[in-house]
Amino acid sequence: MIGTNSQIDLPEPSPDLTRFRNRLSAGRLSFQRCDECHDAWLPPRDHCPHCLSPAFTWEDASGRARVVSWVVYHRAFHPAFADRVPYNVTVVELAEGPRLISNVVGISAADGLAIDTPLALAVETEGDVPVARFRLS
Amino acid sequence: MAHSMRGAAVIAGIGQTAHGKLPGRTPLSMTVEAVRSALRDAGVEKDAVDGVFCKYPTSTFASMYGQQVAEALGMRPRVGGVWDQGGATNISMISFAAMCIENGQCEVAIVTTADNPRTGTRQAYERAWGDDAAYGWFSTPAGYAMIAQRHMAQYGTTSEQLGAIAVACARHGAANPLAAKRTPLTLQDHQASEWVVEPLRRADCCLISDGGAAVVVMSARRAAELGVADPVPILGFGQGQESWEVALRPDLTTTAASASAQTAFTMAGVTPSDIRVAQLYDCFTITPLMILEDYGFCKKGQGGAFVENGNIEVGGQLPINTSGGLLAETGMPGMQLVIEGVRQVRGTSTSQVPGDGPCVVANQGGVMHTHSTLVLGR
């Protein structure tokens, strides 16, 4: 649900998302890899979406990634982002394969972004929640 | 050999409410009005109906809504309920109705939708994408903008080419007295329109409308028995599905429209070059552009060139959205495109395209999550 103040109300995290966030708080961006078929995935879930095995291992990502696509918000859909427009939201693909929604920080709007632009991890926090943002590398 | 379902079912009647800002109207009230109108168009008594298929309203989501609708219609159908594929729901329900009828589960089905996001809540379109709200990832337009940006970066598609779609829909909407928006749009107007989520402008986004619509589906044989005046045969239908997370799609520029059209065109025994006119879901301008590619009207990446220079307007190679589509007729998702498809086959559109070839109708939902295709023709 969207609050009326600047607090972003996120859904109650699953146990796997809590694990992901705890590792990210320690500076480690991680993903899950299936013990059986070795598929790698994000967002966190407790069965392999490829072979459906419940057996997986957390791995640390290198932090290297590339741009898949991006958008620029010119108006905020939530008060928490009102003073940040224009800001980008970017789909990034980790060197290890999994993809995530993120932001590229340290640039104005989306300046310098193109398909396959190389990126490097920049862990930040949004309220109490650690977030995996990226910088141009 | 022709597919056994080709032409087996027909759309016997169409009905709708006004579309736009309709304060004081509930989805149930609009449903009843639209169904009454559709039954009259078919010339069929209510007692003949034994199937009721409903799309849920986004503004007042309620469980067991299909049973509320049946009660408001004073019906106790054999087959009834709600299906949820977002904007792809209506054509999918028409195809389920056709299959139920073919297999003796019901004989005459109502397929209906009504919603009031304009006067009610439109939160469904502006909400956060779950945990990713922490990255400022909100709203339906942003999902389409993410896909549009990839298409632009990969194939050189331009904002002006998206504008050509908005211009075509506005032109066709201006000719339609039932359209909620009847003001013409120039390419200059489109380019002057503000960004919502770049690369999509305000003029790339569809209307948000209140309204209701319904169709009556039955077998061709039953339509003949009941003396239906102008039944429109359903030649083919199909569906396709994509991942929940937009980011997880291996190729952001190819959609489930491709699988959906393949199924529908195979059943109908047609190829894209047979199609006379198309009603393509235009929640955002990027959507019909990619549907044109995925349906095979042009190659992947050439949708931008295809829509330029009036090619998709009446008089062009493939007129689309001849009642104005979601961009001009109504933001109500999908059924109005089906109704316009019926009008094109009957020859009663306000932007009638000459010829007797089939009309293809595309519905899709979410952020290209779901797709459904209908081929109508004689």
Image: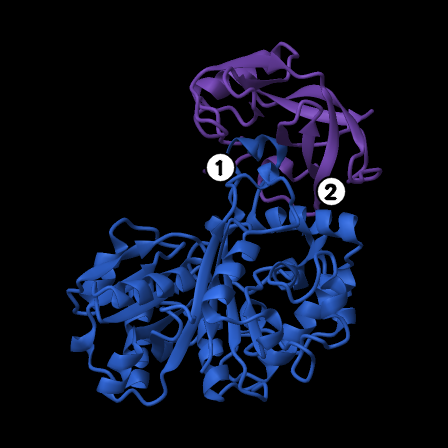
Chain colours: A purple, B blue
Q: Which of B102 and A113 is in front in this view?
A: B102
Q: Is residue A108 visible?
A: yes
Cβ–Cβ under 8 Å for marks 1 and 2: no
Q: In which quarter of the image is residue B108?
A: bottom left
Tag shown at residue B349: none
Q: Can residue B373 be seen in this view?
A: no
What x and y, as percent, mark residue B181? 57, 75
Q: Mark 2 points at which residue?
A: A86
Say which residue appears at 53% left-offset and 13% top-offset.
A57
Q: Which of A110 and B165 is in front in this view?
A: B165
Say which residue appears at 49% left-offset and 65% top-offset.
B266
Residue positioned most to the front? B1
| Above or below: residue B87 compared with residue A60 | below
Say which residue appears at 21% left-offset and 66% top-offset.
B106
Mark 1 and mark 2: Cα distance apart in space: 21 Å
> Is label 2 in a helix, a strand or a loop?
loop
> Is label 1 in a helix, a strand or a loop?
loop
| Above or below: residue B202 compared with residue B218 | above
Q: Mark 1 points at which residue?
A: A3
Residue positioned most to the top? A26
In this rendering, position of residue B61 left or right of residue A25: left
Mark 1 vs mark 2: in front: 2
Say which residue appears at 40% left-offset and 54% top-offset.
B58
* 1 and 2 marks on the same chain: yes
What x and y, as percent, mark residue B215? 35, 73
| Above or below: residue B29 compared with residue B310 | above
